Amino acid sequence: MARDQALSDAELHVLLCAADLNLRQVVAQAAILQDWTARQLSVLRNTFPGWDIDRERGLSGQEWWTAQRRQKLTVELVTAGAMQTVRRSDAIALASALAWQSHLIHGGRTRTRTL
């Protein structure tokens, strides 16, 4: 009776093969995601060369995308809303914030005064 309820060797082998396939798929997907993160970092770093951009884990364990400005900001730029450090929860939000920061920091240089 106990033998009838237990999995046969063949059934156990089928389950292990399925589990192995699932595990391989999960590992492959994790590798793709890791590669995607590296690509996002590369694009951000190339797009915003004035910033040191990285990912970090906060005290709560949450991942953050961070950017630290390489040059110190003037009082005028800080007053206008420019930030020395930007931290967002994902790469797209960081890219958006850095685009705005670039506008604030470089916008004054391209404006012409009307007479």
Image (spheres, rainbow, N blue to C red):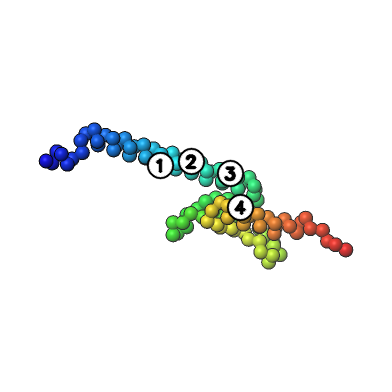
Residue under circle 2? 32
Amino acid type, mark 3: Ser
Where is residue 66, by image quadrant?
bottom right
Residue at mark 1 to residue at mark 4: CA–CA distance: 28 Å
Judged from the image, the secondary structure of the residue bearing numbered disc 2 is helix
Residue at mark 1 to residue at mark 2: CA–CA distance: 10 Å
In this rendering, the answer to whether 13 lies above or below 87 is above
Instruction: Locate residue 39 relative to residue 18 in the image: left or right.
Output: right
Residue under circle 1? 26
Amino acid type, mark 1: Val
Residue under circle 4? 95
Residue occupying image coordinates x 66% and y 64%: 81
Which of disc 3 and disc 1 is earlier in sequence? 1
Instruction: Locate residue 21 relative to residue 8 in the image: left or right.
Output: right
Instruction: Locate residue 91 relative to residue 26 in the image: left or right.
Output: right
In this rendering, the answer to whether 81 lies above or below 28 is below
Q: Does the image show residue 64?
A: yes
Which of disc 4 and disc 1 is earlier in sequence? 1
The spot of residue 37 in percent (x, y) is 52, 45
Residue under circle 3? 42
